[in-house]
Amino acid sequence: MAEGWLPPDQTPTRKWPVVGERAPSPAALDLESATVEFTGLVVRPRVILVRELIARGTQRLEMDVHCVTRWSHRAMCFLGLPLATLLDEVGVSPEATYVRFTAWSERDHDTGLPLEVARRDTWLVHGTDAGPLEIAHGFPLRTVTPGRYFYKSLKWLRRVELLAAPAPGYWERADGYHENADPWPGNERYVSGSVPPETLARFRAATDFAPYAGRTLRGLDLRGWRPAATDLRGLKLKDCDFRGADLSGLDLRGANLTMGNLRGADLRDADLRDADLEGAWLAGADLRGADLRGAFLTAASLVEGDTAARVDAARFAGASGLLEAQRAFLVGQAVAEPPGGD
């Protein structure tokens, strides 16, 4: 691999991990009727059959893919056509400054880019060198945008809408992801800002976490924390600092701890079934006896240099997403039923 291609805190892989939604609404897969609509501030609004765009998409794009969950794939090759070609065909109104992309998905997942970025960089793609896209990766048609974290690339494209002003996408609205999403050089994963001290204090002292259900709390300083309650099921604590926290024996089923710094945390006998630990730092954590069955571990780090998690008697059956070096570490530790690397 070429030197200097990897942004800060990213992990190289030759895999293409599945992140985000796994499947579109059924209408996306009907190639006889599925369409892409070009609307908003365009001169000639159009609705184009997806199969027609696939037939036109014979050009090849090579790009480095950088996911916000900390994995990077060097020099992926996609087949498709530049968005600029279609924008030229429909005509862009002078007042347009922003492009919103919307998916064929149950929640109308969307993302967006400044018009100048989308025109310069975004492609509509239907395949890779290996063949057509898999459904979980956006079949039949998706967008890709080099130079931005991959949440700015949309699966199952349904609509391209030209707008006069920026419109934050799903991940920006829901989880505070950065609108610019540039991995270089500022590592723009999340919007900057701190949690108010009173919010942090209330959370750290809480004896009942039910009031936090459904909310996303991001960037909390939870170093050395020992919760006063044991039921933390389903909590969304993204990009939080858990270094040295005592989470042993807690019920964390279905919790979202993505991008969490869990180095040195005590997770002995914790129930982490179906938890989302994508991009989490776990090197040095104590996972002895922890239950991680069904957990999402894409780009999670169990070992960093000479520092490794303690995994005796931990259970990983059905967990998914570990990258190559991390799975090899678990195999080397003779962990029963190590997770797959999908």
Image (cartoon, rainbow, N blue to C red):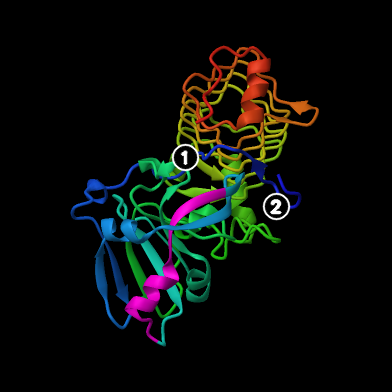
| Region in magenta | 76-93
Is 110 located above or below residue 250 in the figure? below
Residue labelled with disc 1: 18
Residue labelled with disc 2: 5
Q: Earlier in the sequence, mark 2 or mark 1?
A: 2
Left/right placement of residue 5 relative to residue 341 reads right
**Image point 69% across, 50% down: which residue?**
6
Image location (x, y in percent) of residue 270 = 56, 23
Amino acid at dot 2: Trp
- Residue ranking furthest to the left: 33
**Residue 56 colored magenta?**
no
Mark 2 vs mark 1, foreground winner is 2
**Residue 77 colored magenta?**
yes
Inspect this view and state whether residue 125 appears: yes
Q: Nearer the viewer, residue 163 or 259?
A: 163
Q: Nearer the viewer, residue 232 or 120?
A: 120
- Residue ranking furthest to the right: 306
Left/right placement of residue 122 relative to residue 50 reads right
Image location (x, y in percent) of residue 28 = 26, 50
* Residue 320, numbered label: none
Amino acid at dot 1: Val
Q: Nearer the viewer, residue 176 or 119?
A: 119
Image location (x, y in percent) of residue 134 = 38, 41
Q: Residues within 10 Å of mark 2 (few under 14, many from 20)?
A: few
Which type of secondary structure does the marked residue at label 2 adopt? loop
